[in-house]
Amino acid sequence: METFQTILAKRLSDALIAAGLPHAAELTPATDPRFGDYQTNAALVLGKERSENPKILAAKILTQFDVGDLCDPPTVAGAGFINFTLRADAIARKAGEVLRNERLGVAKAKSTRRIVIDFGSPNVAKPMHVGHIRSTALGDALARIAQFLGHEVIRDNHVGDWGTQFGMVIYGWKNLLDREALQRDPLAEIVRIYKETNERSAKDPQVGEACRRELVKLQAGDRENVRIWNECVAFSMQDFDHIYKLLDIHYDIQCGESFYNDRLPGVVDRLLKSGVAEISEGAVVVFFRDIPELADKPCIVRKRDGGFNYATTDLATVDYRINDLKADGIWYVVGAPQILHFKQIFAIARREGYSADLRHITFGSILRADRKIMKTRSGENVPLRDLLEEACKRARKIIEEKNPDLSETDKIDIAQKIGIGAIKYFDLSQYRMTDYVFSWEKMLSLQGNTAPYLQNAYVRIRSIFRKAGESAPNIGNLILKSPAEINLAKRLCQFAEVVPQVLNDFRPNILANYLFELANSFHAFYETCQVLKLEEPARSSRLALCDLAGRVLQRGLDLLGIKVPEKM
RNA sequence: GUGCCUGUAGCUCAACCGGAUAGAGCUUCUGACUUCGGAUCAGAAGGUUGGGGGUUCGAAUCCCUCCAGGCACGCCA
């Protein structure tokens, strides 16, 4: 299904050809309602290129422009903009099409690809903390959107289940473990022994040495140590799964760092053989002498002591995803501090001849009110589990105030949808690169650009249908008369234009913004337009409009990983 | 020291690839309820887009420079 934007863009292109002008510029939504619904600056761009008067060019383009029954006659305005205002009957027809369309008008991408999305990536033997929210919510939302647009998505949890920290965990397990505590709360006990060992080894070099020995034994496949390691991984995964269930996050594969262990020597051998890497000061290193930015930033792929590091693992991961999983693209949803690392990894992958689309999708930090990175009072990371539970608890409290008559099971269910939705939406509605200040009050507010506000719009729509005692009517075209309903219908047609835009620069906040405006338009419509008390056919038309608004809200929030309740 | 990211209303944030008079929300103020959920809506107030230069018809957006904050810079991940 075509959007207004694609139709008008095509006609612009036709008009330019007919006028003997080169194809130029684009056709975009108007920046201001005063300028209509869509605009193009084609005449300005061409005017500049050809040193001609943009206004005259605009007029020339318009003589060839066929708007058909889509728009009122286009106008030339300002320095040479061409403005298009949609006709109400065209909006009614288009909204009718969207209404009957399963995908709500959203076309699949022209070329669909297989994409591995690497997000979340918690570390074993450490509880997930607030910081994981961004990678997890963002990665999941991008996965949902890419999938909806027809891409084949493989969600991969690159769990940190291997590394030097295991020397300490195993040492602690053997010397400090409290079995009872382990039964009560396994992960907490593992974290405790890890921390305590860490402190001890900082003070006592002998402990540090013992940890290194445990690590070497683990890497050599020592049965006892491998058993302990397995157990720790299993306990951690249980904890992650609990959180993922709460967050409604699903992974297709969870190939952690350990998955790549036996592939690491092969990676280094190949890099040495092909000359991409060389020996330097006993280590195996890749230099980027021809890339100014990286010229003084070599990448070590095998340490002097023969050990591998995370660059090696990540290179093995690239190989696996491209060769074994046949990925056309890999998106890494990983924090900004690792920018340099991924630049190096991508540069090496290119040298090895990989042409897959490799993207590092970075994001900022979550801050406290004092603008410091969010930590607990004692300076520890805030456990994600606590945070999610707190969100549900606070949502529950609001529900008790606003709607105390709901059943207990409803309250639990709704509190979860609102609480978790609030946290995710607060994150996703902001530009991913900027740091943001965490605030319970803001994210759970019923006013403003929040999940509860959007959910409430949906709930109101459901309420109308409950009251009506009927489902959405099956009608042809809508009848649009009042400005508020025209505005709402127009907004609904834009869904198809907004969704694909998110992937241009991996910005779910564009979709969030749209949904907020949609909810706003719906509320304005609701305020001025009666539905149920109306005579036919207006009643059915407005009911259909409500239904469509509900479906778009639901689908849009779903693409962000947020659920909607029927009541709240 | 070098590189990267960020800086927009009192606060939290938008602004798609350079477009028109920089938009929302919160807060404050003013209106609207015998209502399909007022958990809402309508309106007002609020700006030297960190500072200064430059590029052009046109800059929050591109270039230079300075300031502030954050992050990263060969054997941790």
Image (cartoon, helix red, strand yellow):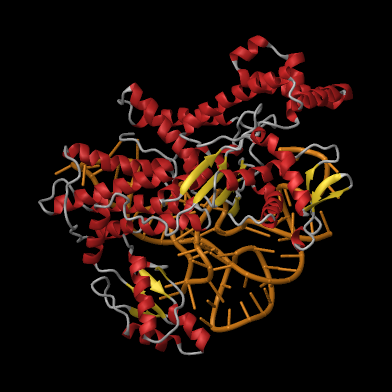
Q: Nearer the viewer, residue A566 or A113?
A: A113
Residue B76 quadrant: top right
Residue A77 quadrant: bottom left
Judged left or right of residue A344, residue A361 is: left
In this rendering, is residue A289 above or below B21? above
Q: Is residue A426 visible?
A: no
Q: Return the x and y of residue A299 as percentages of the image width and height.
A: 77, 49
Look at 44% across and 77% down and name the residue there. Answer: A41
Image quadrant in which the C terminus of chain A is located: top left
Look at 54% across and 52% down and name the residue there. Answer: A328
Q: Return the x and y of residue B68 as percentages of the image width and height.
A: 73, 55
In this rendering, is residue A315 above or below A343? above
Judged left or right of residue A256, residue A202 is: right
In this rendering, is residue A102 above or below A13? above
Look at 80% across and 36% down and name the residue there. Answer: A307
Judged left or right of residue A227, residue A462 is: left
Q: Nearer the viewer, residue A394 or A554?
A: A554
Look at 85% across and 37% down and name the residue there. Answer: A305
Image quadrant in which the N terminus of chain A is located: bottom left
Q: Return the x and y of residue A119 as percentages of the image width and height.
A: 57, 41
Judged left or right of residue A322, residue A69 is: left
Determine the residue located farthest toward the front in the rendered image.
A273
